[in-house]
Image (tube, grey):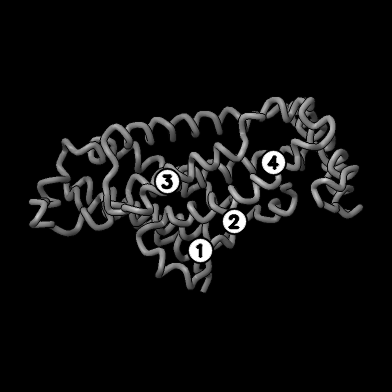
Amino acid sequence: MNTKSALLEISENDLEAARHLFEKKLYPQAIFYLQQSVEKSTKSLGLHFKIISEEDLEEIRHESFRIYVMILEELKESAARGYEKLMKLPGIQSMEVVRKHKDLDPSELNAMLNNFKKYVENPKKSISKEELETIISELDRIEAKTRESIKISEEAIQDFKNQILEIVDLVCESDELGLKLSEEEIEKVKSLTPEQATQLAKYTMLKASCNLHLLYLSVALCPHAIHSRYPFPKQKFNPLNEYTESHLLIEKFDQIADMIERTLNKIPTLFSNSHLDRLEF
């Protein structure tokens, strides 16, 4: 059985179930299946990119955003080492591509990691209305930016390729980074056609967009995997009284469901173009 494909298909069914339940005004159940759709699609991508194994699925359970904490932890360590060495290379800081993205240093990853760790430490704590509104606004911004970025001109692609080649040449001339690119790897980069570079750039943006959407949605919906199904007498909490038309998740249900659907529709493209990961550097 292809587990990642099965999870994606079940995720699509969960989203459809959530919409039907919402139409029937069965709001707690609708929110639960909305959460389930995000959980299963996140696990599907986690398996595809080999972030997790099938054995990890049971341990992660409803806390699918733990997958992204694992990614951020790994990125933080490798980025800190690589960034420090990269900035020591002669001439690197004067390059246009580095000047444009100099703010993307490891401290940004560290801040993001610390922000999401608070949900790992207390995964059953619901985020506030203000935090949820911020997440929805951020996802809207990411979608708009992705749509705009995909409209890439040939000139921009050639400029992107030239900047990458400049860094590759610099890395190859230095022993500081401890990186040794083979002649075959260098030639692969240099021989990228505009069409291949465009395909790679679009794939990279699509991959980032899907992962960011699932990360934020996982954080937003994780607590509701439990809260939407069970009462908590000590807290005088009853999901039937909590998930009403005035609840922000219910108010924003269609918008969130549409975001999830658009993300699910992109995932098969990632599955069918995973060979492009071998061109990322």
The first of marks 1 and 3 along the sequence is: 1
The first of marks 3 and 2 along the sequence is: 3
Q: Position of residue 8 (x, y in %)?
A: 46, 59
Q: Quadrant of residue 194?
A: top right
Can you identify the residue that label 3 sits on?
116
| Label 1 crowd bin: few (<14), some (14–19), many (20+), radius 10 Å | some
Q: Amino acid at mark 4?
A: Tyr
Asked if the residue at tag 2 contacts the one at tag 3, i.e. Cβ–Cβ closer than 8 Å, the answer is no
Q: Going 65% across and 50% down the picture, which residue do you hit?
A: 78
Can you identify the residue that label 1 sits on?
5
Asked if the residue at tag 4 contacts the one at tag 1, i.e. Cβ–Cβ closer than 8 Å, the answer is no
Q: Nearer the viewer, mark 1 or mark 3?
A: 3
Q: CA distance from mark 2 to mark 4?
A: 30 Å
The first of marks 1 and 4 along the sequence is: 1
Asked if the residue at tag 4 contacts the one at tag 2, i.e. Cβ–Cβ closer than 8 Å, the answer is no
Please give left or right for residue 51 compared with residue 158 in the image: left
Q: CA distance from mark 1 to mark 4?
A: 36 Å
Q: CA distance from mark 3 to mark 2?
A: 27 Å
Please give left or right for residue 186 compared with residue 260 in the image: right
Mark 1 residue element: helix
Total numbered labels placed on residues in the image: 4
Residue 2 versus residue 64: which sits nearer the camera?
64
Residue 67 versus residue 42: which sits nearer the camera?
67
Q: Is residue 198 above or below residue 20?
A: above
Can you identify the residue that label 4 sits on?
83
Q: Nearer the viewer, mark 1 or mark 4?
A: 4
Q: CA distance from mark 4 to mark 3?
A: 22 Å
Q: Position of residue 9 (x, y in %)?
A: 44, 60
Q: Amino acid at mark 1?
A: Ser
Residue 180 versus residue 183: which sits nearer the camera?
180
Q: Which mark is residue 271?
A: 2
